[in-house]
Amino acid sequence: MLKAMLRGLFAHKLRLILSALAIILGTAFMSAAFVSGDTISKGFTDLFSTINEDIDAQVTAKSDVPSLEGGGGEALVTKVVPQDVADKLKGLDGAESVTPQVVSDGARVIGKDGKVVASNGPPRLGGAWPANINEDPNLELRLGTGPTAPDQVVLSANLAKSAGVTVGDKVEIITLQPRRTFTVSGISGYKGGRDSLGGETFVYFTLPVAQELMLGTTGVYSNVDIKAAPGVSQETLKQRAQAVVGDGYTVRTGEETSQEQASGIQSFLSIFSTGLAVFGFLALFTGAFLIFNTFSMLIAQRTRELALYRSFGANRGQVLRSVLLESLLLGLAASIVGLLIGFGLGWLLTRLLRSTGFPGGALVISPWVVIGTLFAGTIITVLSALAPALRASRVAPIEAMRDAAKPDKPLRRLTTFGLILMAVGIALLILKGTKTLEDNVLTLGGGCLFIFIGAVMVAPALSRPITGTIGKLVDWATPGRLGVRNTGRNPRRTALTAAALMIGVTLATGAGVFASSVKAGLSDIFASELNADLILQTDFTAGPTAGFQPALMDQVRQIPGVSTAAALQTDGVKLANRDEFVVATDAKAAQTLFTLEPREGEIRELNSGEIILNDGFATKTGLKVGDTATMQTARGEAKDLKVIGILASSQVVTNPLISPADASGFRSPLAQQAYIKVTDPAQIEPVRTQLKTLVADNPEVSVSDPSAQIKQATTFLDLMLNVLNVLLGLTILVAVLGVINTLLLSVFERTRELGLLRAIGMNRSRMGWMITVEAVLISVFGALLGMVLGTALGITLVKIFGGNFLKLTIPWGYLIATLVLAVIAGLIAALLPAWRAARLNVLQAIAYE
Amino acid sequence: MTMTPAARAVEVWKVYGTGEAQVQALRGVSAEFERGKYTAIMGPSGSGKSTLMHCLAGLDTVNAGTVYIGETQVTGLGDAGLTKLRREKVGFIFQQFNLLPTLTAAENITLPLAIAGRQPDKAWYDTVILTVGLGDRLHHRPSELSGGQQQRVACARALVSRPEVIFADEPTGNLDSRSGTDVLNFLRDSVRQHGQTIVMVTHDPNAASYADRVVFLADGEIVDEILSPTADSVLDRMKKLDRNA
């Protein structure tokens, strides 16, 4: 009996393959994400343990100031180990060797094109060339010699390549000090042919030059590496070293050092693999709709067959089990295929990343990934098939004798239930909006999910009126009219097919509305509060040490036509025991440039030892005018600052302001930005030209203006939108599969009708047109639902997070593009079913039972 | 003056399968179907009567011989030509009614014109509608009509484009006898009153008795014909054919 029923399943191969594709896609993305993540992570772990093989303990100076990069492993060293501490470690009991090192972020090489060689995240390290390169366990000289004179450097192979220089060439390098010219004496690399560990670049100076340029003064080190004598454990060595250096220094074991180094790089990796995994889950979720729909259709079609089994004496359990078994087999098979494709994708990805400098060996396939992927793919398939399976088990034996075509069940119950779910979702969002309930996961996540699922349930009731209305556009010709009628024929099927598309469109539209509102809000702020005409901007990829001398402002103010100018030096500090960014600037000029108003106290030029707090920080800390706040900078000593004023709420200045005189302990002595106001608009272009000449020798600084700033500030939004668009593309792909599937079934079910239409004179192309209308209507319906829902959710989010920051804006162009995309998707989906319909043999089609 | 027949088969051969399994469905059949006449094609199962009709209507291809509808040679036409032929010159009535469930009765009736992009001739449309006698059920969907009503809608659909010939394949096969009689009367009236040409395949002697002429097929060949048949005379011939077979 089971065998007979399974044969029934495989009789619909094409349709099953189509719905399995969604599962394959989902599981493939999922497993690719995990496999490539694991592989690269293993690569890093291996790499760092090799590199740190000779380090059993490492001593660094402790810093109270928070790291700029969030993680623990900041590459920019601001607290140093002085010579005397290093010397004290020299005779450490149980140490085989003690090696003081100089390594820090912030060695920027200017390439052949006159621009600083860009980095998209990894640090640009500068340090001292090892005393004896032949004994170094990792580093090797590939070309030339090590640096022997103060004006010689060795570049890492990847850096030399990006900069376009080789041994003997002159190269300019910016460090803590302005640009200086060096001669490349050699090119280095890691043993085993590796250019870098994780994309970082390296400049090696002679020891005194490295100390001066990278750490600010000679006779200091960034860290001291200690190798244990045989028989001494890392932990013992750590404790002994700690006892020698005292509390002001951190001592880590070699293993801890490796973890520390790996953690920074891996946070980037996890973003990447999370993205892939989200793609995977989304494809699976969309796929669930497809599976549900396919099984519903297969069951409806096989009602007679199932009833026949029932009349032979098969019980409900047998029917239920056989359908579930079908789904289990399908889900498992699809997941296995998906898993294999995922391995392939993962391999490709690690290959791709390896070519950009990532480590990686053989593909790491953890059993958990295999089990997890197979389980997820299979369970989703089985769950999606559960409802249709239950329906199948309720087929009465008598239905074997009846005509298969039954009138559709009324939609009232489904619609009512859907509306209730939507109401619950809306209620949750209202609770959030009125701040009655603060839990984001419950209110926002739950609310959106309830509304979404409710909408899917209401969709069948909407499908006929909506597709009928859109259908008016194609109603003028018979094939169009027939296509429209066919779309309205089975509202559940149409709505479910459209729902697959709705998922992606809802997400993308919601985010689109939010993003365009943020953009519009930002533009408004810049327009109303920013009173500057020109901006000097440091390339933010140039790292925390890039910028220009604040003294440059003296020259800027000399330019005819400039009325006000202020340089901004921003750095992370510890202020009143909080991690905070502060801005060192001319507060008087800032008042004009950023239209600042005092809420309390006054705004005037700050003396050393004074601070003006922004509204938010004052509220958080409860500090008042006249109070004192202690500031700890990265390189300097703690200093008490007196609050002389508190700013009224501003969207541009959201950090405390201090005097440039108190910025001497910042990580970098340079300013990152300057805002300039001119006397009248006609002066903008002449001043711009003058500014460009002023910064011509500083490739990290460019002359910008507010509108360019807006663009810059919103690039991350565009990036986010791009990611969402890829997501949308993926779900559209799955949705197209669903439309193909549904239409193939419809063509199959309506064989006789199609035969009749041909018999009474409809030609092949019009028949195709009829099918196409149906496909396009389904996908446009899905897109419309998604757009309405997404826009509504986007508006809700804007209202909830609103404030002055967001200005509700609907991205019409984006919506129209989505609609056009839906039409194209429909057209593509129609191809196969239309071709099938057109190919029907008229005589056989009419005689078809 | 001699008029071209509405449909004509000349030495038509139709073979299915190859080798051992080969079946010769039509073996050199020649027949003419006069304009304005109601012809029934009869014969035992497997005699080739349906095949003959399918070949005449251009639904099936022939292995040898020629088929004409009016002046048009059907054999040799491509899909586009056949589509045009069906659209302009041929009407069909099927045993299974074959109405489109999404369209109302009235829309089903005008469907061939809509497909051809023609406007219905108002007077003729009204005549057809009147003869069909659906009255207020004209705007109902097929699922709300009885079998007899559905088949009358199908008849009206075949008539409305005034084809040169209507092919009816067992039109009463799925109907009770009263509904069947209605449909047969309707078909005969359309021949008598409006000069329509009808070719009907049936195995029911009573249905055949409504025709002007009955052609008998056996083993793929025309073996006999009767003019102005009655149910009894048809039944007689059928019995004889069975005996010979």
Image: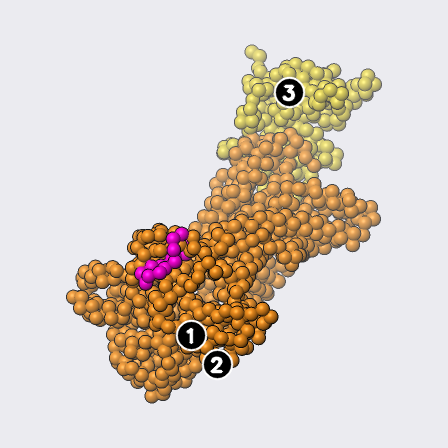
Q: Quadrant of residue A702 in the image?
A: bottom left
Q: Are marks 2 and 3 in contact (CB under 8 Å)?
A: no
- Name the side, left or right, on which A681 lies relative to B96: left
Residue type beneath disc 1: Val
Q: Residues within 10 Å of mark 1 (few under 14, many from 20)?
A: many
Locate residue A294, reporting x and y percent: 64, 48
Co-location on one chain, circles 2 and 3? no
Please, what secondary structure does the residue beneath circle 3 have? Answer: loop
Q: Chain of mark 2?
A: A
Examine the rendered structure and indicate whether residue A827 appears above or below residue A531.
above
Please state the total of marks drawn on the protein image: 3
Write down the residue under mark 1: A81
Which residue is rendered at x = 34% and y = 84% of the image? A641
Residue A147 part of the magenta segment: yes
Q: Nearer the viewer, mark 3 or mark 1?
A: 1
User: Residue B211, position in %: x, y?
Assistant: 69, 23
Residue under label 2: A247
Q: Earlier in the sequence, mark 1 or mark 2?
A: 1
Amino acid residing under circle 2:
Asp
Q: Which residues are magenta?
A: A143-159
Label 3 CA crowd tier, 10 Å (few <14, some 14–19, many 20+): many
| Chain ID, mark 1 | A
Amino acid identity at mark 3 = Val
Any part of residue B87 in sight: yes
Residue drawn at x 72%, y 25% as measured from the top left: B208
Colour seen for chain A: orange
Residue under circle 3? B62
Q: Cα distance, mark 2 to mark 3?
A: 103 Å
Task: State the separation of the CA atoms marked 3 and 1.
Answer: 100 Å
